Image (tube, rainbow, N blue to C red):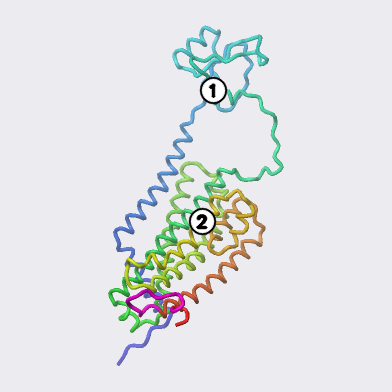
C-alpha cells in the first residue's frame, strides 16, 4: 500500500528544512557568521573605547584670568606666570592662559612649541545658533545609517543569493534534480529553496541586530538605539520582502545554466539590480529627490525607505505605499521566476536564454 502524498505546505517545508540543515552543517557558513558577529561587536566596542578615551585639553589658568567653563577644556589653576610656564615646559598642560592687558579677552595663550588647534577652537567666540529644523539628523550619522542598512541588505542578498544559485546548478549538474522532481513538484521545490534561504538570511540578520543592540546598550549608546528603533523595524519588514524577490531571481537564473562556471553570466543582471540602487542610496543619502525616488523602487526600497524614516522625511503613509509596491513586484517576480525555473530546470548542456525560458 503506497503512502499518502504530502501536502504542498509540508513539501515546501521539507525542502526548506533541507536547505537550512545543509547550510548549518557547512563549516564555512558557521565560521563566516561568527566572524561577522565578532566584527560587529568589535566595531561597537572599539568605537566606544575611542570616544571614552577622548580626554579634555588641560589648560593652566593664572589667577585673575576670567575663563569660565569651556567644553573640552580642563582648567588647572596656578598662582602666576612662572608656575604656568613650568607646567607647560614639563608637559603637564597643553597650554596656559596668562594675563595680558593688551588682549581684548584680557588674557593670552602660552604654549611650548605650539598651541593645540582644538583649544583655539574651544576658546573662539562664536555667535548663538538657532536651527529652524532642530530635529534634523546629523549628516554624518545619516551617512552611517545609509551605509549600515545598505551593507546589510547588499551583503545578505549577494551571499545568500549566490548560494541558492549555486545550489540549483549543483543539483542540475549532478542530476539530483531528476530524483527530486520525481517526488516534488517544481514550484514546491522553488518555494522551499526560497523559504529556507530567506529564513537563514533573516536568522543571520537577527543575530547581527541583537549583537549590535546588546553592544550599544552595554557601551551606553542609548540615544543612537532610540533613534534607530522605528527605522530598524521597518528595515526588517522591507528586508524580508526584498530578499524573497531577489532569492526568486537568483534561483531562476541559476536554473538557466548547468555548470558552476556559467553562473556569473546569468546572475550578473540580478547583481546589477542590487548594486546600482545600493550605491545611489549610499552616495546620495543627503539628496532628498534621489532618496525619495529610490525609496519607492523595489530593489532599493529596503534601504531607502528606512533611511527616510530615520531622517524623519517620510510621511506616515509613504512606508505603506512603498511596501505595497514592493509586495506587488515581489509577487510578479515570483511568478516570472517560477516560470523560468520550471522551464529551465531539466534542460542540460548549453545556457538557456531568457526568451526560451519565458516563452517555453
Q: Which residues are magenta?
A: 344-356
Task: Residue under label 2, please give it.
Answer: 278
Residue 182 in the image: above or below residue 158: below
Q: Secondary structure at mark 1?
A: strand
| Label 2 vs 1, first from the N-terminus | 1
* Vertical relation: 73 (above or below) 17: above
Q: Nearer the viewer, mark 2 or mark 1?
A: 2
Give the percent coordinates (x, y) of residue 264. Answer: 38, 64
Quadrant placement of the N terminus:
bottom left
Instruction: Give me the residue at 63% from left, 65% from top.
Output: 321
Bin the neighbour count of mark 1 within 10 Å (Cα to Cα): few under 14, some 14-19, many 20 and up. some
The residue located at (46%, 39%) in the rendering is 48
Question: Looking at the image, is 51 positioned above or below residue 237?
Answer: above
Residue pictured at 43% horizontal, 81% vertical: 8
Reading the image, the residue beneath label 1 is: 74
Q: For the view shown, which residue lies furthest in the left direction?
A: 174
Q: Residue 79's x, y, as percent?
A: 55, 9
Whole-number angstrom distance, CA of label 2 to CA of label 1: 45 Å
Amino acid at each position: 500500500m503506497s503512502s499518502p502524498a504530502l501536502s504542498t505546505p509540508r513539501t515546501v517545508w521539507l525542502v526548506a528544512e533541507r536547505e537550512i540543515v545543509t547550510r548549518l552543517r557547512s563549516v564555512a557558513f558557521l565560521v563566516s557568521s561568527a566572524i561577522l558577529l565578532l566584527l560587529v561587536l568589535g566595531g561597537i566596542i572599539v568605537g566606544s573605547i575611542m570616544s571614552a578615551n577622548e580626554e579634555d585639553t588641560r589648560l593652566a589658568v593664572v589667577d585673575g584670568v576670567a575663563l569660565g567653563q569651556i567644553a573640552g577644556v580642563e582648567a588647572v589653576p596656578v598662582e602666576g606666570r612662572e608656575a604656568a610656564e613650568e607646567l607647560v615646559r614639563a608637559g603637564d598642560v597643553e597650554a596656559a592662559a596668562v594675563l595680558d592687558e593688551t588682549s581684548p579677552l584680557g588674557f593670552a595663550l602660552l604654549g611650548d612649541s605650539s598651541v593645540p588647534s582644538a583649544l583655539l577652537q574651544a576658546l573662539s567666540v562664536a555667535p548663538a545658533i538657532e536651527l529652524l529644523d532642530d530635529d534634523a539628523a546629523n549628516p554624518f550619522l545619516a551617512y552611517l545609517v545609509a551605509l549600515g542598512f545598505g551593507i546589510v541588505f547588499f551583503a545578505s542578498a549577494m551571499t545568500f543569493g549566490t548560494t541558492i544559485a549555486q545550489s540549483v546548478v549543483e543539483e542540475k549538474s549532478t542530476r539530483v534534480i531528476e530524483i527530486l522532481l520525481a517526488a516534488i513538484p517544481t514550484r514546491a521545490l522553488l518555494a522551499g529553496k526560497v523559504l529556507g534561504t530567506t529564513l537563514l538570511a533573516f536568522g543571520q540578520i537577527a543575530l547581527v541586530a541583537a549583537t549590535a543592540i546588546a553592544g550599544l546598550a552595554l557601551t551606553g549608546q542609548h540615544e543612537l538605539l532610540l533613534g534607530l528603533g522605528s527605522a530598524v523595524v521597518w528595515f526588517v519588514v522591507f528586508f524580508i520582502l526584498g530578499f524573497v524577490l531577489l532569492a526568486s531571481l537568483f534561483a531562476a537564473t541559476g536554473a538557466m545554466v548547468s555548470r558552476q562556471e556559467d553562473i556569473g553570466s546569468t546572475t550578473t543582471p540580478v547583481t546589477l539590480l542590487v548594486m546600482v540602487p545600493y550605491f545611489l542610496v549610499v552616495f546620495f543619502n543627503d539628496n532628498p529627490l534621489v532618496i525619495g525616488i529610490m525609496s519607492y523602487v523595489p530593489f532599493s526600497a529596503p534601504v531607502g525607505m528606512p533611511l527616510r524614516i530615520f531622517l524623519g522625511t517620510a510621511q506616515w503613509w509613504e512606508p505603506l505605499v512603498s511596501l505595497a509596491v514592493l509586495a506587488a513586484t515581489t509577487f510578479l517576480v515570483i511568478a516570472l521566476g517560477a516560470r523560468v525555473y520550471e522551464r529551465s530546470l531539466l534542460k542540460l548542456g548549453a545556457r538557456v536564454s531568457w526568451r526560451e525560458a519565458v516563452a517555453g
